[in-house]
Image: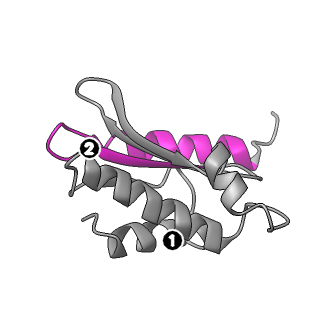
Amino acid sequence: MAKKTRADMRKIRHLRVRKKVYGTSERPRLAIFRSNRYIYAQIIDDDRGLTLVSASSLEKGFREKYSDKKSLKNKDIAAEIGKLIAERAKEKGITKVVFDRGGFKYHGKIKALADAAREAGLEF
């Protein structure tokens, strides 16, 4: 029997959380994904199966703004993504969301993104 990798265990945690966390039109889901290099955030309406708003450190404008940094994978970048997703959500009229950490620990970059989104006006 093969030992499960960290990625496999994260997927299992994510599926367990997704059984309980569901985004509606009134309160969509703020889903986070973190790769080794970038961080992504989406606000999703699960009723309709639509991504309403998204932000990522991979976006061209974002990468140009922070081109002086050696890598785009620290807590400061995650906080900027949190502010950006909150601003875009406010433009669409979204103020309340359900937070989906994607199976990652609520620590470090995930926590920095969540705190910055809360400070920028999202409620969760």
Instruction: Provide the secondary structure element on which disc 1 rests.
Output: helix
Picture layout, residue 25 above or below residue 30: above
- Residue 27 highlighted magenta (yes or no): yes
Give the magenta range: 6-33
Badge 2 amino acid: Pro
Picture layout, residue 25 above or below residue 65: above
Residue 28 in view here: yes
Instruction: Provide the secondary structure element on which disc 2 rests.
Output: loop
Label disc, if present, on residue 28 of the rendered structure: 2
Tag 2–tag 1 contact (CB < 8 Å)? no
* Left or right: 91 in relation to 43: left
Q: For the C terminus, give its image quadrant.
A: bottom left
Q: Residues within 10 Å of mark 2 (few under 14, many from 20)?
A: many
- Outermost residue, right direction? 70
- The image shows residue 43 at horizontal and vertical percentages of 37, 44
Residue 106 in view here: no
Q: Residue at x 81, y 33 (%)?
A: 1
Badge 1 amino acid: Lys
Q: Residues within 10 Å of mark 1 (few under 14, many from 20)?
A: some
Q: Nearer the viewer, residue 55 or 62?
A: 62
Q: Residue at x 35, y 37 (%)?
A: 44
* Left or right: 37 in relation to 40: right
Label disc, if present, on residue 111 of the rendered structure: 1
Q: How are the residues colored? A: one colour
Label disc, if present, on residue 37 of the rendered structure: none
- The image shows residue 95 at horizontal and vertical percentages of 21, 57
- Outermost residue, left direction? 26
